[in-house]
Image: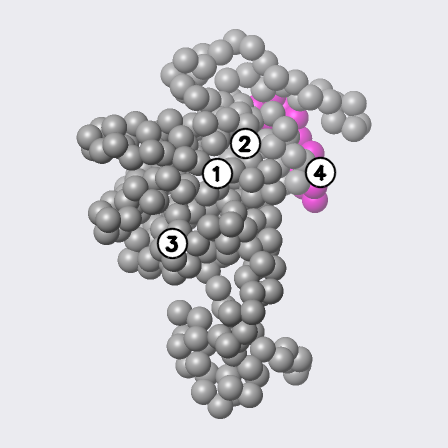
């Protein structure tokens, strides 16, 4: 098939999420379906040496909800099982501010599906989201190394520590959430708490601010739209003729 594009620019997704928040410097915590990333950005440029990735995401949480429902002898058509379990996860699961205080909570959250089937989740609704902060709860392992995964908050702190100390305060003060797996109720408050505790443990007087747009599930696309409309970016577009003549132009212009 013949390509019909006229010009393109390759951008880092979390950087676009930061643009969507109206910032050019900050730490982007992106939690998606299959992986999570923490990306420090300074004046519009991703600090590649400080980017960290976690090999788990929303899909792993959906699998956990599926296993809980199977234990309750609730099953769905294989064709729609993932979508239905994902829907239940999004509606019922919550990030606990203090997981230890709710780990044995006896209360249940309930919802009724369109077909009349009632779904009920107890402390599992907290445990599901807690896996973002403690992956070992669901038995998740590091796929690249034979060890435990770090939580998303610890990974964010490690990303900051890899950056120059002169911009540490800027990163702590401009934490931007992105991705569908940050949409859980309580996620913003929990991230704030964990980062605040980390800054206090380091005996640093960093002011922590966490920004969570209601549209952060689509932040990358919104940021891409903003970025593409900037007149200052037009000189960096790679035309089709430039690419065909010198493919490495993409690396020169975009990275």
Q: Earlier in the sequence, mark 4 or mark 2?
A: 4
Q: Position of residue 57 (x, y in %)?
A: 48, 42
Q: Dot 2, crowdedness within 10 Å: few (<14), some or many (≥20)?
A: some
Q: Is 49 left or right of 55, judged from the image as shown?
A: left
Residue nearer the viewer, 106 or 20 = 20
Q: Which mark is residue 77?
A: 4
Q: Position of residue 46 (x, y in %)?
A: 38, 58
Quadrant showing the C terminus: bottom left
Q: Secondary structure at mark 1?
A: strand
Q: Earlier in the sequence, mark 4 or mark 1?
A: 4
Q: Secondary structure at mark 2?
A: loop
Span colored in magenta: 69-81
Q: CA distance from mark 3 to mark 2?
A: 24 Å
Q: Which mark is residue 41?
A: 3
Asked if the residue at tag 2 contacts the one at tag 3, i.e. Cβ–Cβ closer than 8 Å, the answer is: no
Asked if the residue at tag 1 contacts the one at tag 4, i.e. Cβ–Cβ closer than 8 Å, the answer is: no
């Amino acid at each position: 098939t013949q390509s019909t594009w006229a010009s393109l620019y390759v951008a880092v997704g979390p950087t676009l999420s930061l643009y969507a928040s109206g910032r050019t410097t900050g730490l982007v915590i992106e939690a998606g379906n299959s992986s999570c990333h923490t990306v420090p950005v300074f004046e519009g440029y991703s600090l590649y040496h400080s980017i960290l990735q976690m090999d788990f995401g929303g899909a792993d949480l959906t699998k956990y909800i599926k296993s809980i429902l199977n234990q309750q002898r609730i099953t769905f058509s294989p064709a729609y099982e993932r979508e239905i379990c994902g829907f239940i996860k999004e509606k019922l699961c919550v990030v606990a501010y203090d997981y230890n205080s709710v780990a044995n909570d006896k209360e249940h959250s309930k919802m009724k599906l369109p077909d009349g089937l009632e779904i009920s989740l107890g402390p599992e609704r907290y445990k599901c989201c807690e896996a973002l902060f403690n992956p070992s709860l669901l038995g998740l392992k590091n796929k690249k190394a034979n060890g435990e995964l770090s939580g998303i908050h610890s990974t964010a702190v490690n990303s900051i520590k890899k950056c120059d100390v002169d911009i540490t305060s800027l990163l702590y003060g401009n934490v931007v959430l992105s991705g569908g797996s940050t949409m859980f109720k309580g996620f913003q408050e929990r991230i704030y708490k964990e980062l605040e505790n980390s800054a206090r443990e380091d005996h640093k007087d960093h002011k922590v601010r966490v920004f969570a747009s209601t549209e952060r599930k689509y932040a990358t696309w919104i940021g891409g739209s903003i970025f593409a409309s900037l007149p200052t970016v037009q000189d960096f577009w790679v035309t089709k003729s430039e690419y065909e003549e010198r493919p490495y132009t993409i690396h020169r212009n975009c990275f």
